[in-house]
Amino acid sequence: MPETDTDALPTALQLAAVTLAMQHPLTRSWTPDDERLPWLARAHEDDLDLMTDMEMATFRASYFAFPGLDAPTYLNRWQPVSADLSALLSIRFENRVRSRPFVDLSGLSRPWDVTDLAALKRAALEVYGVFAPRYLRLFSSAPVDALPGLGRDRRFVAAPVSVLAAAKTTIPPELSLRPTEDDRHLAQAGAAYAALDAQHPGHAYQAQVLDAEQLQEAIDAGLMFDVLVQGEWAGYAGVHPDEDLGLPSYSVQELLLAPAFRGRGYGAHLTTLLARAILVARPEEPGRMLFGTIHADNAGAYPAALRAGRMDVGGWVQLRLIDQ
């Protein structure tokens, strides 16, 4: 791998300023820029660390085991793209699946536009073409399908928790939430995901059920809830405290109805119930956002989130790198 000119590298704060400039205008009204910038910078510190973290690179080389590729090949790279644009590129794998590599655009010297796409494609293939990556992933605050030639990916759907909790809606009297106590229903949740995967083959790459460790962490934080219909377990609704797009947030960890309880209109009320339960569990943090990252092709969860009052504030798009 060519040596990196450390004098030419951006700082995390410089990367954060570009990332902030690319955000949806609505999100910039939720939290002041001067508060948001340091949070974005912390995320970019991790991106920059992965340019030199040989321990992580060695682990990834062992885990993914591409023949003939040594550990430095897995490091992030600050790559010239054009005369006025450089990009921080990362090799990633969907759901850690070796056969699904892609390149992530993790930072920029300035916001990208459609005239940069051909040069960005060349740069991604120059650095990571040995992995045969399927696409380059870029962030855009534009609406879904607003950029011709770019494929769909996950979207950020969000709204202030306090706004969602105050929604004027009539909750079905048989529908409620209660704090989850243990993992007794985790197998049922897994079966619900399997049913969705069977019905919609793309769902397996769009969403995955939380694992036992994630469930326990949410339980310990008091932020995982059983969905009940007339007292019977019907699903999960839970979050964990996070920073999404540089905003203080509760990131949705699970919002699930078991198959037997779908089609009754309950899904539209889960976000309201969850927001209200969060404010009871964490009354000291009313200013956080409720964030979910949902694939635009998820025909159930994505429109349901919008109907429940969350707003699409941008997301990733895919620039195809190789024919499939």
Image (tube, helix red, strand yellow):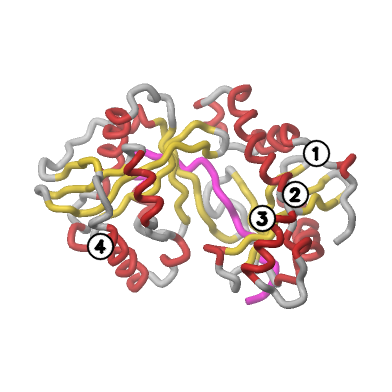
Give me the C-alpha separation between circle 1 and circle 4: 47 Å
- Indicate whether 155 appears above or below 149: above
Q: Secondary structure at mark 1?
A: loop
Residue marked by disc 3: 104
- On screen, residue 96 versus residue 178, left or right, reads right
The answer to which of marks 2 and 1 sits earlier in the sequence is 1
Q: Residue at x 54, y 58 (%)?
A: 152
Counting from the top left corner in percent of width and height, residue 34 is at 63, 22
Residue that badge 4 annotates: 188
Label 3 close to label 2 by CB (< 8 Å): no
> Residue 285: where, in percent of width, then height?
40, 25
Mark sitting earlier along the chain (3/2):
2
Kindly state the secondary structure of the residue where label 2 is placed.
strand
The span from disc 3 to disc 2 (Cα, nearest Å) is: 8 Å
Q: Amino acid at mark 1?
A: Pro
The amino acid pointed to by label 3 is: Asp
Structural crowding at the residue carrying mark 1, measured as other residues with C-alpha within 10 Å and reported as few (<14), some (14–19) or many (≥20):
some
The image shows residue 24, relative to residue 34, as above or below, that is: below
Instruction: Tell me the residue at 38%/24% (across/down).
Output: 286
Q: Look at discs 4 and 3 and give the one toward the viewer.
A: 4
Check disc 1 and report the residue beneath it.
10
| Circles 2 and 1 in contact, beta carbons < 8 Å | yes
Q: Which residues are magenta?
A: 305-324
Q: Give the residue type at disc 4.
A: Gln
Check disc 2 and report the residue beneath it. Answer: 88
Name which of mark 3 and mark 1 comes first in the sequence: 1
**Label 4 – label 3 distance at C-alpha:** 34 Å
Work out whether residue 62 can be spotted: yes
Decide: is 104 above or below 135. above
Tell me the amino acid under the disc marked 2: Leu
Q: Dividing the image into 4 quarters, which one contains the N terminus?
A: bottom right
In the rendered structure, the answer to whether residue 173 lies left or right of residue 20 reads left
